[in-house]
Amino acid sequence: MNEKPPLDSLEDRAWLGEGCSQTQLAAAHGSGAAEASDDDDRPAWDSKVQYVLAQVGFSVGLGNVWRFPYLCHQNGGGAFMLLYVFLLLIVGVPLFFMELAAGQSIRQGSIGVWKHISPNLAGIGYSSCIVCFYVALYYNVIIAWSLFYMGNSFQYPLPWERCPTDVATNDTVKECASSSPTSYFWFRKALDITNSIQESGEFNPVMTGCLLAAWAIVALAMIKGIKSSAKVMYFSSVFPYVVLFIFLIRGLMLDGAIEGIKYMFYPKLEIWGNLQVWRQAATQVFFALGLGYGSVIAYSSYNPVHNNCHRDALMVSCINFMTSVLATLVVFVVLGFRAKTIALGCVAKNLGLLNLMISSEPNQHALGTGWPWINSTDPSVVSVAEYRQWYAQHSSDLGPTITDCSLEEEMNKGVEGTGLAFIAFTEVMALFPASPFWSTLFFLMLLNLGLSTMFGTMQGILTPLMDNFKLLARYRTVLTVSSCLLGFILGLLFTQRSGNYFVAMFDDYSATLPLVIVVVFETTSVAWVYGTDRFLDDIEVMLKWRPPVVYKYLWKYVCLLAMVGLLAASLLRMVFKGPTYTAWNQTAASEMTLEYPGWALAMIIMLIILASSPVPIGYLHAKLRQRGSLDSHGEQGGGQEMHRELYTKCNSTELLDSRQQTPGEEEGAYPRTAFLPIGSEQYRLLPQQEEEEEEEDTGV
């Protein structure tokens, strides 16, 4: 057997050079190197169900409910789904499997995993932690919004059902009349938003209280690590599915549901020629599985070493996709009902105007009797299709007062993100009988979706820190509470009246690009630094069977090229299009797209650099330490060369690689490693070892 050498423990890597592979070590000790290096007191999942619920809860988040349906809506419906499945299979599943296998094999958080592969790569894990913290900051704000809306759902009628009255003029508030009750409640009552990011405004006290409550929930759920958060997962991961199925059943009974489903699944294959659609599909695959956060690695590190992580990767990816499809069905059913309600309202309004024209002017009466099949006195019996046919034939005779009413046009008005959840859905639920019940149910679902993702995000921060800093591991509770308290203090940025604009900034730019950069380095580390053959050897020991060789080529070429392409496309789009955000103008009572001011652009760049800089800094730091170790041991009379000869392969024709044989980095001491005999390729200690041991014991 002639395989690439491993990069084993931190000390061994630094001076031993070519030694036993991770596979050989695992075979030697029976339970794998991962278990050998793992602490006896490392937490573990109580059951496989807990672990699967945790991974599904983290990967299935708010993006499945409001991002995936929007992308389907805007990019060809069924055609986008086919493209998404294709990219999921060739990019998403292999990268997800890679992170699961790395965490389970090495049994460390993201910092420890990449440090295990090479000390030069420890910065990848620190970058993951920083990005996780970015995401946690603004994601908990969305949970705070859900808490605010859920609290306001215990009213009848719902506070966003109708426009309020201006007490000064005794008329409807102008801003609400010019937009809609749901838009007014969101922008004015919930956010009390400013006209631009440059107008910060004071803090929103109600949202500040909701944010404090959100962080308190996260802290209480995670105060005992996975032991406490896993129990919460039983509810937070399962409950959203119950609500989605309830909404689907209720939505299918609504008028317009079938039109919405037809619109969803009608394929527009021409979108496959649009590079932007490919970029959006790849980005959605990337974020849907939670790649790069380190949370997938953290969760899998608590697994038994022989757990079938390949099956887990396929299962969680499939559940994630099916959840996106289920959520999209619910969204399109509801949007179909909303579109048909608006279209029928338009028909009733226009027929009412036509009826006034007929009754006010005698010559218009003849106009009305010219089309006896249009009943202008009873619009409820006129369908949208009949009205559109009538309008197409006689629009030239009607003048500008009478307008067209298109259901498709209403469906084409795609709503994304917070607009879908807090404006479009709230508008529809106000039309339901027993609307407070449906509203409470919906926002309780959003709350649980957000919390299950937050638990995974925080685990991606806490686990690597506790694995690499034993002092923090001893004070787990203090670390958890302190992290949540720091998150709340920094999160006050988002509870200003301009806070929603900062949420959009973090979501669109500050977290996206660093995450893609992290995954590019992760893939390069496994495929080209550690080696795909060696990585597959390690997985073979864990699974007791070897994964298909196709993963080797997917990791080395397809996934890496796809992520580099996504990074390039994202950077080019940001450079040429320029970062923009959507602002609410109170005077016009409408949204408008604005460019970020100079200081905001500087903030975006600073956040991206801050999240990406640990990778090059970690590399330079490791190189300087290695050089310092070489210099210090060179002064001791060529200790490097002496220890280089301590180990030799019993039957190998390869010489030890002198370039990798540097002293241990952590303590500068020479480790005394003995490998057990393995197969045809084994290592033995040469006679000098006893003499060297005596020298080391006496401090020579």
Image (cartoon, helix red, strand yellow):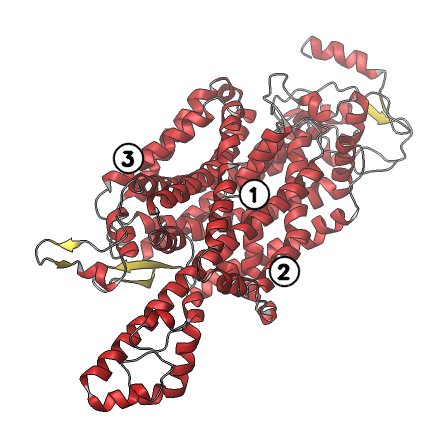
Q: Secondary structure at mark 3?
A: helix
Marks 1/3: CA–CA distance: 31 Å
Residue 562 image point, x, y percent: 63, 56
Q: Amino acid at mark 1?
A: Gly
The amino acid marked with disc number 2 is: Leu
* Residue indicated by mark 2: 82
Q: Against 373, is 548 above or below?
A: above
Q: Nearer the viewer, residue 222 or 473?
A: 222
Which residue shows up at 29% across the image and 51% down it?
Answer: 186
In the picture, the quarter occupied by the C terminus is top right
Pair 3/2: label in front: 2
Say left or right for 400 vs 478.
left
Q: Nearer the viewer, mark 1 or mark 2?
A: 2
> Residue 417: x percent and y percent?
42, 53
* Image quadrant assignment for residue 205: top left
Numbered tag placed on residue 209 in the rendering: 3
Residue at image coords 52%, 65% = 263
Rendered-image quadrant of the N terminus: top right
Identity of the amino acid at label 3? Gly
Q: Are marks 1 and 3 in contact (CB under 8 Å)?
A: no
CA distance separating discs 3 and 2: 43 Å
Check the image and report above or below for 480 versus 330. above
Percent across and percent down for residue 557 are 71, 53
Q: Does 335 appear above or below 287? A: below
Estimate how packed mark 3 is, as few (under 14), some (14 to 19) or many (20 or more) residues with alpha carbons within 10 Å: few
Say few, some or many: other residues with alpha carbon within 10 Å of mark 2 (under 14 / 14 to 19 / 20 or more). Answer: some
Residue 680 at x, y percent in the picture? 91, 29
Viewer-nearest residue: 164 or 113:
164
- How much space separates mark 1 and mark 2, taking CA atoms? 24 Å
Query: Residue 292 — which label?
Result: 1
Kindly state the secondary structure of the residue where label 1 is placed. Answer: loop
| Nearest to the observer: residue 325 or residue 552 | 325
